[in-house]
């Protein structure tokens, strides 16, 4: 049985990814804060291992790595993330250093640190695949308006207003792609899931997290044929300009 570790598995896309992998017969390490509140179908599944982790807490990340020592992880999905305001429907602008730092910690620093800490686990796995759930908002292409996903939120300039979230995703991309340069035995792929109805995406989003998760799992299960290394793709596997 193969193992996938998913951060932010309690809700949103992470929960949908968890359900989709379980349905494909995978073992999942479901990582997140308040992870005991994960819905029953995932929480009580015998193929689920729940791990309580606060991504902004260094000790919590290191405890996870210690607990998982000698456990193969075939695919590591850095999915957890926070927006810079309450959701895409909130047009406020983040301006305090504390809040800015928190967004960068959750969205960029913790995913890279987790990859560093779990490198031995990835090396024990058969897929050696590290995934970052990123965003079109983190691309310079979208900032300058020359590669815009039709399912993205807003019009040109939106990502510039939400520069904290956008830049944290740019930093995520850099942190994970540079990990791949340092560790070429691990394949790194970045996926923009699209604008989904979740706590971040809001109710007006055109895509459901279940549909996006199904498409993403399809990509991951067939990654050797369908998922390019060191690139950003959308949930259907189309390459996006960084
Ligand atoms: N929704 C969209 O339209 C959209 C578009 C592009 C990219 N994305 C990306 O997709 C990913 C999943 O987001 P989502 O839309 O599913 O949003 P979501 O429903 O808000 O889920 C985010 C998950 O991350 C977890 N999380 C947040 N901060 C954490 C922390 N400090 N420690 C541990 N876990 C933490 C949350 O835990 P709690 O349940 O405890 O809050 C939640 O499970 C994110 O990386 C997001 O940036 C989303």
Image (tube, rainbow, N blue to C red):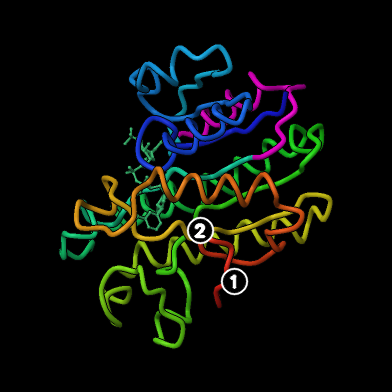
Q: Is residue 87 found left or right of 107 in the rendered image?
A: left
Residue sitting at x 74%, y 39%: 119
Q: Secondary structure at mark 1?
A: strand
148 in magenta: no
Residue sitting at x 44%, y 30%: 32
Residue sitting at x 44%, y 21%: 42
The image shows a total of numbered marks equal to 2
Q: For the residues marked 2 and 1, what is the alpha-carbon distance in whole angstroms? A: 10 Å
User: What residue span does the magenta drawing correspond to?
Assistant: 57-75
Disc 2 crowd rating (10 Å Cα; few below 14, some 14-19, many 20+) is: many
Q: Position of residue 70 (x, y in %)?
A: 77, 22
Disc 1 crowd rating (10 Å Cα; few below 14, some 14-19, many 20+) is: some
> In the image shown, does 131 or 170 lie closer to the viewer?
131
Using the image, tell me which numbered label, if any, was put on residue 235: 2
Q: Are marks 2 and 1 in contact (CB under 8 Å)?
A: no
**Residue 188 lies in quadrant:** bottom right
Q: Position of residue 1 (x, y in %)?
A: 72, 23
64 in magenta: yes
Q: Position of residue 2 (x, y in %)?
A: 71, 28
> In the image shown, does 17 or 215 lie closer to the viewer?
215
Q: Is residue 171 above or below residue 140?
A: above
Residue sitting at x 34%, y 64%: 164
- Ligand 1, by image quadrant, is top left
Location of mark 1 (residue) = 239
Q: Position of residue 126 (x, y in %)?
A: 81, 37
């Amino acid at each position: 049985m193969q193992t996938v570790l998913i951060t932010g598995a309690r809700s949103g896309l992470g929960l949908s990814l968890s359900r989709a992998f379980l349905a494909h017969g995978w073992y999942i390490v479901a990582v997140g804060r308040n992870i005991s509140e994960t819905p029953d179908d995932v929480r009580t599944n015998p193929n689920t291992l729940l791990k309580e982790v606060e991504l902004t807490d260094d000790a919590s990340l290191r405890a996870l790595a210690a607990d998982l020592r000698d456990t193969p992880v075939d695919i590591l999905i850095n999915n957890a993330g926070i927006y810079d305001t309450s959701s895409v429907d909130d047009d406020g602008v983040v301006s305090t250093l504390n809040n800015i730092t928190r967004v960068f910690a959750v969205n960029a620093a913790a995913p890279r640190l987790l990859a560093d800490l779990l490198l031995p686990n990835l090396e024990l796995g058969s897929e050696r695949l590290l995934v970052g759930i990123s965003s079109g908002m983190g691309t310079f292409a979208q900032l300058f308006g020359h590669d815009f996903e039709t399912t993205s939120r807003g019009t040109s300039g939106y990502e510039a207003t939400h520069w904290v979230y956008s830049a944290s995703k740019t930093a995520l991309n850099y942190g994970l792609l540079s990990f791949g340069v340092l560790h070429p035995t691990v394949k790194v792929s970045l996926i923009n899931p699209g604008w989904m109805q979740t706590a971040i995406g809001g109710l007006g989003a055109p895509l459901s997290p279940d549909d996006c998760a199904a498409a993403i799992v399809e990509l991951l299960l067939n990654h050797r044929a369908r998922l390019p290394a060191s690139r950003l793709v959308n949930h259907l596997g189309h390459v996006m300009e960084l």
